[in-house]
Image (spheres, rainbow, N blue to C red):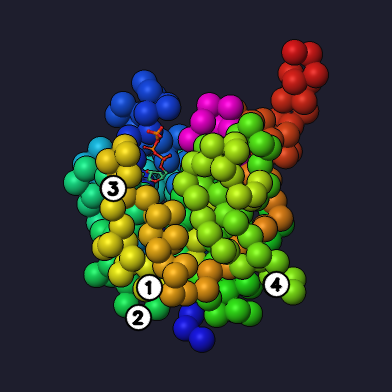
Amino acid sequence: MKKIIKAVLPVAGFGTRFLPATKAIPKEMLPIIDKPLIEYAVEEAVNAGIEEIIFVTSHTKVAIENHFDTNFELEEKLQKNSKHEFIPLINPENFKNVRFTYVRQKSPNGLGDAINHTSHLINDEPFAILLADDLIFSEESCLSQLKIVYESLGSSVIGVNEVPQDEISKYGVIDPKYVDSNIKVNNIVEKPSINDAPSNLAVVGRYILDNEIFKYLERTKKDSSNEIQLTDAIKLMLTDHEVFACKYKGNKFDCGSKKGFVAATVFKGLQDEVISKAIYDLVQKS
Ligand code: UTP
């Protein structure tokens, strides 16, 4: 079985729901406490064995390139001022052997279009996709949990979780078929109405896909908002290939929305040994 060594992290969206904050700063650079969303996603990928991170980026996202580059001036200053403890934070040891590659998506024509921009960088191999705005805190990372399913079944795997009925229309939703202890994807529907939703299992921003997906992305037509959706390409792929779902264990926050972003900040703050007491008192009082 081929190893998964490449991960695509699309970051070329407008981040409209976070304006004006995202006018000049990429949404993925917004921090949960002191770490940008994108770094949590890169950490998750690297800890799951990924060796190359491919960002699909745009002209407004240079801050992301700078974030994963070396900042010699700052490192030197920290050395000189004996603030050594900060150096591993700006130059993490576990990113040292990771290759960072950047591809430009000229205009945000949808997640499927963003992924399709990486076809020349993915060989005959499965690859991971992580959407940094879906932040997941768990003992074993969400991507590692998907990897276990991929390694046991050898097919594409998408992360799913249960969502309440009144939120289902915001997501891609799967029609599941339970086979032994696995969930096979029968069908997948992008943002269905409550009545048309085939289940309460919504797709989260973690995928391990066979490279055949590019063939289907080529054939995928734009949707009513003029975007090419990854979900639609997966739906096409289902006609010839098996795809499985992984109901991962963990706490997921949709940090592309204000509610999810604030919830993630409070959740993480309550785990931080320095500020947890203050955050707890604040939440209790309000
Ligand atoms: P979202 O659907 O959250 O879109 O994209 P967005 O533009 O970031 O945010 P809003 O809806 O305008 O507030 C999910 C992920 O896919 C990337 C985004 O950067 C985000 O990480 N994306 C989306 C692209 O890279 N290109 C696209 O054309 C669309």
Mark pair 4, 2: CA separation:
28 Å
Residue 76 shown left or right of residue 218 in the figure: right
- x, y percent for residue 102: 27, 57
Secondary structure at badge 4 equals strand
Q: Residue furthest left?
A: 106
Report helix, strand or loop for mark 2: loop
Give the residue type at disc 4. Val
- Contact check, label 3 and label 4, Cβ < 8 Å: no
Circle nearer the viewer, 4 or 2: 4
The amino acid at mark 3 is Lys
Circles 4, 2 touching at the beta carbon (< 8 Å): no
- Residue that mark 4 sits on: 179
Picture quadrant where residue 123 is located: bottom left
In terms of sequence position, does the residue under pointer 4 or pointer 1 come before the other? 4
Say whether marks 2 and 1 touch (CB < 8 Å): yes
Disc 2 CB within 8 Å of nearest ligand 1 atom: no
Residue that label 1 marks: 211
Residue at (66, 46) in percent of width and height = 200
Among numbered discs 3 and 2, the one appearing first in the sequence = 2
The response on whether ligand 1 sits within 8 Å of label 1 is no
Assign ligand 1 to one image quadrant: top left
The residue at the far bottom in this view is 1
Left-right relation of 103 to 283: left
- The answer to whether marks 3 and 2 mark residues whose Cβ atoms lie closer than 8 Å is no
Residue 19 in the image: x percent, y percent? 38, 23
Q: Give the range drawn in magenta.
A: 253-261
Q: Where is residue 211 in the image (x, y as percent from the top left)?
A: 38, 73
Mark whose residue sits in front, 3 or 1: 3
Disc number lying in front (3 or 2):
3
Q: Which of marks 3 and 1 is nearer the N terminus?
A: 1
Between residues 227 and 102, which one lies in front from this camera angle?
227
Amino acid carrying label 1: it is Asn
